[in-house]
Image (cartoon, rainbow, N blue to C red):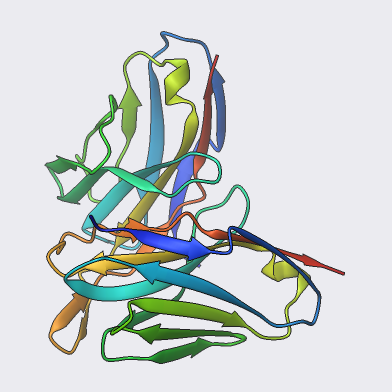
């Protein structure tokens, strides 16, 4: 089982509040990711990081921001929550990659997720 | 456009029966294909990962197949158990996406009934 943790697991909050979703991993992985998943839908990458002080936006536009000050920690912040932000947020991390022939394969390990509801 | 399509959308089977889930993809250039199991309210857990040179891989009662020519994969579950009830997600990685970004299918929701 992967050592990647997310808190809180569930959060109900009012519109306009600032929130931070926490994600920590103890595997020493350089790469970390944030995904957003609506019920019955596919995961969409919203942020990723290759290492400390490295952050990039993913495929899905998001009003959230992330930071990577420590290798093990990758928090996601919403400055002003809105009902449209209601979703499940999944954090993941990956190792440097397994060599498979001439290709690199990055095994991603997911946290349990945070279910966010903005009222 | 890179896409991953899964079928069926949902499936109900009786405990002990076998089932097969399908995945078609249009991702190019192809790097690898993964199957994940996602329990309700939890994060996905990897079951198998295959490159284009592999056409089958097993993990206990789970067997994945890959046909890189037709761009199809299947996940076969043998002797299903109640704990197999979950969403099964097909995920494809494109070779150019070296940062580890993955293209996710919407998943097949499997319900195993006693």
Q: Where is residue A25 in the image (x, y as percent from the top left)?
A: 37, 54
- Residue at the extreme right: B114
- Which is nearer the eye, A94 or A119? A119
For the question of whether residue A72 can be seen, the reply is: no
- Which is nearer the eye, A78 or B5? B5
Say left or right for A48 vs B41.
Answer: left
**Residue, x 29% and y 27% (percent of image)?**
A64
Say left or right for B23 vs A69.
Answer: right
**Residue, x 43% and y 66% (percent of image)?**
B90
Quadrant in which residue B21 is drawn: bottom right
Quadrant in which residue A98 is drawn: bottom left
**Residue, x 25% and y 58% (percent of image)?**
B2
Q: Position of residue B106 (x, y in %)?
A: 47, 54
Q: Image height check: is B68 above or below A114?
A: below
- Residue at the extreme top: A16
Quadrant in which residue B82 is drawn: bottom right
- Which is nearer the eye, A26 or B74? B74
Say left or right for B78 vs A92.
Answer: right
Q: How many labels does the image show?
A: 0
For the question of whether residue B6 can be seen, the reply is: yes
Q: Image height check: is A17 above or below B53?
A: above
Q: Image height check: is B14 above or below A76?
A: below
Q: Where is residue B107 in the image (x, y as percent from the top left)?
A: 51, 58
| The N terminus of chain B lies in quadrant | bottom left
| The C terminus of chain B lies in quadrant | bottom right
């Amino acid at each position: 089982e992967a050592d990647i943790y997310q808190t809180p697991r569930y959060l109900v909050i009012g519109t306009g509040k600032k929130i931070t979703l926490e994600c920590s991993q103890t595997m020493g992985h350089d790469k970390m990711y944030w995904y957003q998943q609506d019920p019955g839908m596919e995961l969409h990458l919203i942020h990723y990081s290759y290492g400390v002080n490295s952050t990039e936006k993913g495929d899905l536009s998001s009003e959230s921001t992330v930071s990577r000050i420590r290798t093990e920690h990758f928090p996601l912040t919403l400055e002003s929550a809105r009902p449209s932000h209601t979703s499940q947020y999944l954090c993941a991390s990956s190792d440097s990659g397994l060599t498979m022939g001439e290709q690199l394969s990055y095994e991603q390990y997911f946290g349990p997720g945070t279910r966010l509801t903005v009222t | 456009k890179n896409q991953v399509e899964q079928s069926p959308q949902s499936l109900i089977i009786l405990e002990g029966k076998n089932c097969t889930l399908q995945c078609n993809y249009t991702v190019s250039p192809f790097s690898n294909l993964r199957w994940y199991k996602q329990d309700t309210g939890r994060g996905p857990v990897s079951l198998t990962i295959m490159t284009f040179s592999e056409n089958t891989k097993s993990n206990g009662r789970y067997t994945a197949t890959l046909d890189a020519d037709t761009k199809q994969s299947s996940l076969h579950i043998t002797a299903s158990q109640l704990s197999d009830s979950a969403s099964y997600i097909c995920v494809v990685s494109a070779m150019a996406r070296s940062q580890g970004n993955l293209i996710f299918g919407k998943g097949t929701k499997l319900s195993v009934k006693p």
